[in-house]
Amino acid sequence: MRLRPALLAVTGVLTAVSLTACGSGGGTSADAGASATCPGGKIRFGVEPFEDPAKLTPAAKVLAEALGEQLHCPVQLAVTEDYAGEVLALQNGKLDIALFGPLGYVFAHQRAGAEAVASFGDSSGKVSSYTAGLWVPADSPVREVKDLAGHSLALSSVGSTSGDALPRKALADAGLKTTDLKTNYAGGHAEALLALAKGTVDAAEINSQQLASATQSKTFDPAKFRKIWASDPIPNDPIALRKNLDPAFKKAVTDALLHLPADKVGQLGALLAVKQAAPLVAVDKSTYQPLFDLADTLKLTDKDL
C-alpha cells in the first residue's frame, strides 16, 4: 500500500487541526499571545493515528487540555491522517509538538530535527514499553516465522514501528524474501487484527498495545489465536518538540508535560498498554537509539513513510 502524496498528507493534518481545536483554561487567546508560554497564541499538538480515532481523540484531548491549563494557552489537537503527514507538518511549522511512534520519531528527528522530551512512564517511574508480535489462528500449521512462506500476512501501516519495520525485520531474519509470502498493509493496527480475526489473512501483526485494547473490548479472543514471534521491548511513544521553537517555550512545555497529573495522562497511556496511570517521564534521542539502529539496518529513510 502506498501512502498519500506528501501535499495531501499535510493538508489532512491542517484540516484535522481546524476541526479538532480544543481550548484550555487560563485566559483569552489575546492574553495568551503575549505570554512566553504561548508565543503564537496557541499550541498545535499532533498525535499519530495509532488507534481508532473514536478512542484516540477523546483520550488525547484530556492530555491536551491539561497541558493548556498548565501553560495558560489554548491547545489545538490534531489526530493526523498518517505518519508522513505528521512528520511533514512538524517540519513545515504546522505543528509545535507531536506524539510520534518510535520509528516515526526517528524520521521526524532526521527530517525535522524533532526533539523527544517526554514519554509514558510505568509505575516505577521508568519509560514504559510494548512489543511487536506476529499471530496466527490457534490451529494454523504455521509454528514459526519461517513457516509463513506461501501464506498471507497483514501488516499495519507503512512506517509503523511494530506494524511494519519490526515484523519485516523478523521476516528477513528468518530468511524470507518479500516474494516468499503475500504481504499487505491493512491500514492500521486495528485493521490488521480484524483481518486475522475475520480469517481474511493467514497471519497478522498484533502489537501488545492493540492486543490489550482489543482483548478488553472483547473484539479479539487470544485463546483462539497463537503468537509465533515477539520483538524485544520497544520504548513507548515520545512527545517531541519542533526544533526551532524558542528555548524558553520548549523548557516551559517540557516542564508542563513532566508535571501533568497521572489521571490526565492515563487515558492516553492506557491506549498504549500502560496498565497503571502514571506521569510522563523524561526521554531524549538516546532513549530511541535502538530504533535509529533499526532504521539503519533496514536502510529506511523518511521516504519509506
Image (spheres, rainbow, N blue to C red):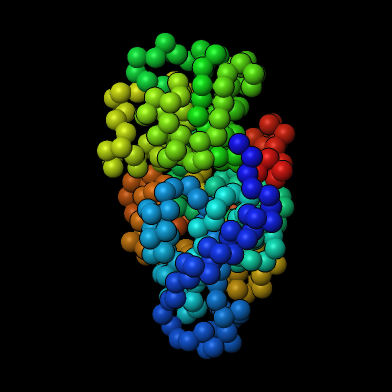
Q: Nearer the viewer, residue 178 or 67?
A: 178
Would residue 190 be found to the left or right of residue 185 on screen?
Answer: left
Residue 45, position as x, y percentages in the image? 53, 64
Q: Quadrant of the C terminus?
A: top right
In the displayed structure, 30 sits above or below 295; it is below
| Outermost residue to the top | 141
Query: Residue drawn 65% across and 55% down?
Result: 8
In the displayed structure, 53 sits above or below 305; it is below
Q: Would residue 2 be seen by someone viewing this image from the given angle? A: yes
Query: Residue drawn 34% across and 18% down?
Result: 138
Residue 265: which quarter of the image? bottom left
Would residue 215 be found to the left or right of residue 15 on screen?
Answer: left
Residue 245, position as x, y percentages in the image? 66, 70
Q: Would residue 114 be seen by someone viewing this image from the given angle? A: no
User: What is the number of callouts on the image?
Assistant: 0
In the displayed structure, 170 sits above or below 288; it is above
Query: Residue drawn 53% across and 63% down?
Result: 16
Residue 23, position as x, y percentages in the image? 44, 76
Q: Quadrant of the N terminus?
A: top right
Query: Residue drawn 33% across and 61% down?
Result: 263
Residue 275, position as x, y percentages in the image? 33, 46
